[in-house]
Amino acid sequence: MSEARIPYALDPQGRPVYIYRAEHKLNYYTCIECGSYLDPRQGEVNIWYFAHEKLDPASKECPLRTKEGLEDLLQRFRISPVEKSESNKQIRLVLSPNPYTKTIRLFGILPVLRWEDLTNPGEVKDVLNSLTFQGEGIISPLQSRIFHPSEPEAKVELDPNADKYELTIDTQNPRYKSLYLIENWTTEPISVKDVFFGESNRAERRSSNSRFRNGDTLFIVQKEDFQEKIEGCENLVMSPWKILKFEVNDKNRIIVNRFIEVSADTDNFYVDIILPSYATPNSESPISGKPESKALIAVTPPQERDPEFEIVSVPLGKENKILPRNGNGVPRIFCPRFPIEGSRRLSVHWGNEHRMINLHAESEKKTFQKPWIEDVELGLELRTEGKRKLLNPWSIEGAISIELVKIKENRIDLNLIGPEEFKIDVKGFFSEKSDYRGLICMWDTSLEKAESILNSWIKEDCKRIILDYDSLGIIELDIQQPKPWQKKLPDSEIENILSNLDKIPKKAGWSIVRKVYGVPLETSHDELPDGVKKQVRRALMKVRRKNEGH
Ligand SMILES: [Zn+2]
């Protein structure tokens, strides 16, 4: 008989544990279904799993011994914590710190109306107008428009001092009674040692068995200010509570462990939002983007692991996507699209851990107000004879040749293009002959200033200029000094050259001009300065007249 390969078990505290997070302990983990002991099987090669102990008769009839029972278990773990809390009608709690006043506001997060629950878009107004609210612990009266389906989520300000949070949403129209929003929503009040996790401007309350990693920002609720010194720690106020805010690192992990079970280790997986570039990489708050545009997400497994990740929708739908194995600790990427309207919520999950991503379609109007998100131009613009070329720091390889003569004669225009607040470093390498000599660096320079530095350095005989755009790359300019034949010779020198020729020519044709200026064979005489032919002809006439006079 083949063993059922069970990926999840319960620890003695009754918390679910994924096999890849399990310690190798016998008579320790128990079956979620039948309660008998499960042994972790963690071989070198095979996929790891829990198995019922063979001698335990109680497990004989366990549903996890069947394919259907096992599939049902897997399905339960695909459901993200956010979906679970919403289906339990729980209000999610988030903190919103104000960095200037060191105070914090508390908000409850609720889902909004879903387009798919409405029979037609015109119904939205009807539904919203029919809603009624009754609540406890809520600071200001609710507006029904916060539940509009084009919003990413509904945010309700809460009183941190309340001992009860309750919001009853009802409708005056019986037709809408079955909408999932029409319910009694609640959550536990704030208490000492509550832990919020997130970014410096938004953090969500987490259960005590969450996992954290170095660099994560935590907020811990307390009655009094924390007296011990933690480096980089801030004491904030959310009256009547004191909130300790800090970033987890190797040094303070011991202190963190007093509040919450922290397994900050190399065994976590990371989900980073790479595109859109304006999104905070590890953000769990909604990201706004152009409808149907693509985002780019990287999922990095723990260093020593090469698991498959699953991307599921929130709430769980029929579609899910597997990110295949790619090597230990090697990132995998995928490109979800922003929806046409409303929000698309996805969860990346591995075992019983989930990371939610909320892609929110900006309405047309909002997109119109912020076109810079889509069309930002950045780089060095070259203008020559009405032609325009934009060089981006991330897409050029090697140095760009710029001819000094063309700059001096204004035949080429160099402009630095980019957002007003953007700053770059400018580095110039000067020849020993120039007044500057050697390397000059200008750090953190605005584009406007950098542009004028760039143009003046080129004219000061700078040989090489590097425009440093930090992580975006560099643009390197190689300044080509004029070739000898590109400088106009004085009339006297031309007359000298002509008189010293073996035979004084009769006519000043191009071959004579080229000879006088020393233009190499393979070079076009277009490179010669303007008016040289006339100049040579004049000089030749003078030389011939002088010769005849002798
Ligand atoms: Zn069992």
Image (cartoon, rainbow, N blue to C red):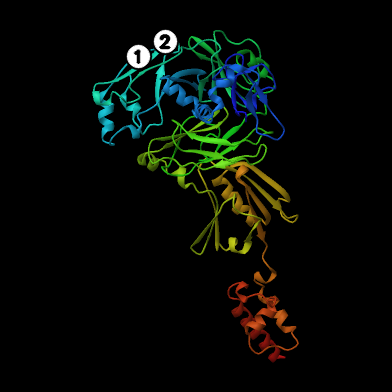
Local crowd size for mark 1, using a 10 Å CA cut-off: few (<14), some (14–19), many (≥20):
some
**Image coordinates for residue 315, horizontal then vertical, percent:** 43, 30
Please rate how many residues cluster around mark 2, counting C-alpha atoms within 10 Å: few if below 14, some from 14 to 19, many from 20.
some
Name the amino acid, label 2. Lys
Q: Which residue lies at the image location 35% right of the left edge and 29% below the top edge? A: 113
What residue is at 72 percent from the left and 79 percent from the top? Answer: 496
Ligand 1 neighbours mark 2 (CB distance < 8 Å): no
**Which quadrant would the C terminus be assigned to in this image?**
bottom right
Q: What is the three-letter code of the residue carrying label 1?
A: Gly
- Decide if residue 209 is in sight here: no
Above or below: residue 150 compared with residue 477: above
Vertical arrangement, residue 419 with respect to residue 123, above or below: below
Q: Nearer the viewer, residue 336 or 33?
A: 33
Task: Give the percent coordinates (x, y) of residue 462.
Answer: 68, 55
Q: Is residue 497 visible?
A: yes
Q: Which mark is residue 135?
A: 1
Give the SS element for disc 1. strand
State the residue position of label 2: 164
Q: Compare residues 135 and 29 and report the one nearer the observer.
A: 29
Q: Is residue 415 above or below residue 317?
A: below
Q: Earlier in the sequence, mark 2 or mark 1?
A: 1
* Residue 53 image-quadrant placement: top right
Residue at 57% across / 51% down in the picture?
392
The image quarter containing residue 171 is top left
